Image (cartoon, rainbow, N blue to C red):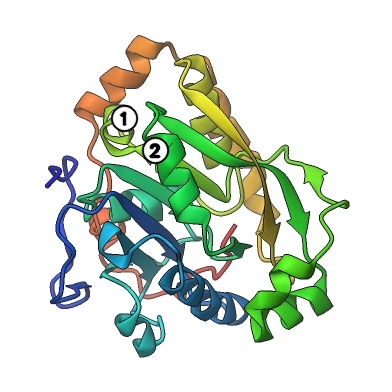
Amino acid sequence: MHENPPGANRSSGSSFANPEEIEDPDISVVIPYRHYEAYDNFLDFTLHCFKDQSLPRSRFTIILTEQDIKPRAPIRVAHHVDRYVFGWSDRPFNRAWGLNMGFADNSATYYCCFDVDFVVDREFLERQLARMQKGINVLRPYRRIRNLDSDETQNVLADPSLLSTLPVSYSLHAKSVGGILIFRADFYRRLGGYVEDFEGWGYEDTLMARWVKKLGEWSEGDETVYHMWHPPSGNKKTALPNKAIFESYNDWSAEQIYARAAGASWGSTERYRVMDPGSKEEPDSSQG
């Protein structure tokens, strides 16, 4: 069992672990989530996809993290995840924090960060685990992203088997460094997880990729992954402050990166309660 990162604690009464807990899984999949109508449909679909993976279920866990002023994830997800972690927040969606909260409940050797609007095939985890076991610390498993249009998205949601029939010739060479990223868990801990200063739209994954590449640990697969269509959800008003945050960390040396990890408190479900315990505002629902 891996140790929790410094500062990682659970909110009483709002998190749970499946009583049939999987001991010492090979890989954990964390899905950061905030209630948004389109993402609720995607969440059901994504959990179904992982339930149907070819990798034996005893070898991986699914962790769902939610951030809001109250839990809103459909109660039915309890039957499909191994752990659910809730963090109170009235702030814009903080993807980095959501991923770090999940790591506090990770006991696996590898840690897969997975956005709910991506689609993968049923052999996905088995292939990625085999790649990671060759000594990789960080893997972006895809080289191409196929953006589904609205009709394709609805068709795939209705019948996942249609995914294999979609043409991939229109796939774009991926400039994205987010969506799906897999870490060796002890390396994620050495990094101190994602920087949690980013809120709303963008740059948390750009900074992570920049640091990992600077440390010489970046690897890429040659797969095509699928991104489901949804109405624009990112609040681009946050892009400018997030860019400034990115630039403040961008030139850090390896020594600074590892020193931050050693002294940082990250992954705490109480992050925003401590910052603003009296706030009652409805949060921004943008997933980023």
SS class, disc 2 = strand
Whether residue 248 is visible, yes or no, is no
- Where is residue 53, by image quadrant? bottom left
Q: Residues within 10 Å of mark 1 (few under 14, many from 20)?
A: some
Q: Residues within 10 Å of mark 2 (few under 14, many from 20)?
A: many
Residue that appears at 39% across and 12% down? 254
Q: Which residue is mark 2?
A: 183
Q: Which residue is mark 1?
A: 187
- Near-viewer residue (54 or 233): 54
Question: With respect to residue 283, does 271 lie above or below?
Answer: above
* Spatial separation of the CA atoms under disc 1 and disc 2: 7 Å
| Mark 1 touches mark 2? (CB < 8 Å) | yes
Q: Residue 208 location, x and y as percent?
A: 49, 32
- Near-viewer residue (254 or 269): 254
The answer to whether residue 22 is left or right of residue 178 is left
Residue that appears at 74% across and 71% down? 231
Q: Amino acid at mark 1?
A: Phe
Q: How many numbered marks, from 0 up?
A: 2
Residue 92: mark:
none
Q: Residue 218 location, x and y as percent?
A: 51, 25
The answer to whether residue 15 is left or right of residue 172 is left
